[in-house]
Image (cartoon, rainbow, N blue to C red):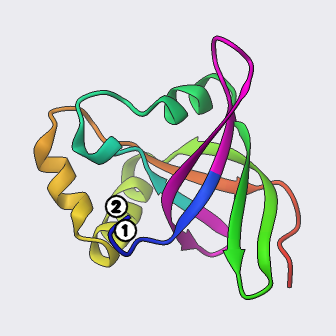
Amino acid sequence: MRGIPVLLLTTRGRRTGLPRTRPVGYGRDGRRFVVIASNGGDDATPAWWLNLRHDPVAEIEVGGAGGLTALKVRAVEATGEEYERLWRMMSRRHPVYEGYKGMTPRHIPVVVLDPLDALPA
C-alpha cells in the first residue's frame, strides 16, 4: 500500500449481513484511527465505507510490536474543520491521497474509527 500502514477492517455486509474484511491504510489521531475512503481514486465508493454507513460498528486488527490487536470501533465521517485537518494530516504523510483526489470528481470521505474497547498499553 505504498508505504502506508495497514489495518484489517471487518465490516458487516449491508445486504448479506456477512463479515467482510479488507486491508485499509490508516493513520492515528490520538487514540483514534483515521482511514480514507479513496478507493485508489476510483469513482466508485469503496464497499467497506458503504457497509460502515449502514452499520458503523466494526472490528479492526492492527499490528504492533506485540502482534495483532483486535478492537471494536465505531466509524464516523469527519466533516468541516475536522475533515480538513485530518485530510491534511493524512496527505502530508502519504501524498498519494492528493493524487487520488485529482482522479475522481466524488468527495473522498475521511473516516474516523473510534475504539469502543480499551487500547492495550
Residue 83: x %, y % from top left: 39, 54
Q: Is residue 17 above or below residue 45?
A: above
Left-right relation of 49 to 62: left
Amino acid at circle 1: Met
Q: Amino acid at mark 2?
A: Trp
The residue furthest left is 102
Q: Position of residue 5 (x, y in %)?
A: 49, 72
Name the residue nearer the viewer: 76 or 13.
13
Residue 38 sits in quarter: top left
Check the picture and name the quadrant holding the N terminus.
Answer: bottom left
Q: Nearest the camera: 90 or 13?
A: 13
Vertical arrangement, residue 10 with respect to residue 13, above or below: below
Residue 103 vs 25, above or below: the answer is above
Q: Classify residue 1 as left or right of residue 17.
A: left
Q: Magenta stretch?
A: 9-33
Left or right placement of residue 27 versus residue 106 in this view: right
Q: Residue at x 69, y 42 (%)?
A: 10
Residue appearing at x 53%, y 65% in the figure: 6
- Residue at the farthest top position: 15
> Residue 29 magenta-drawn?
yes
Q: Secondary structure at mark 1?
A: helix
Q: Tell me the residue that label 1 is attached to.
A: 90
Please state the horizontal and vertical placement of residue 99, each as a whole percent of the image: 15, 57
Asked which secondary structure carries label 2, the reply is helix
In screen coordinates, is 11 left or right of 86? Answer: right
| Magenta segment, prevailing SS (helix, strand or loop) | strand
Q: Which mark is residue 14?
A: none
Q: Are marks 2 and 1 in contact (CB under 8 Å)?
A: yes
Local packing at callout 1 (Cα closer than 10 Å; few below 14, some 14-19, many 20+) is many
Mark linked to residue 87: 2
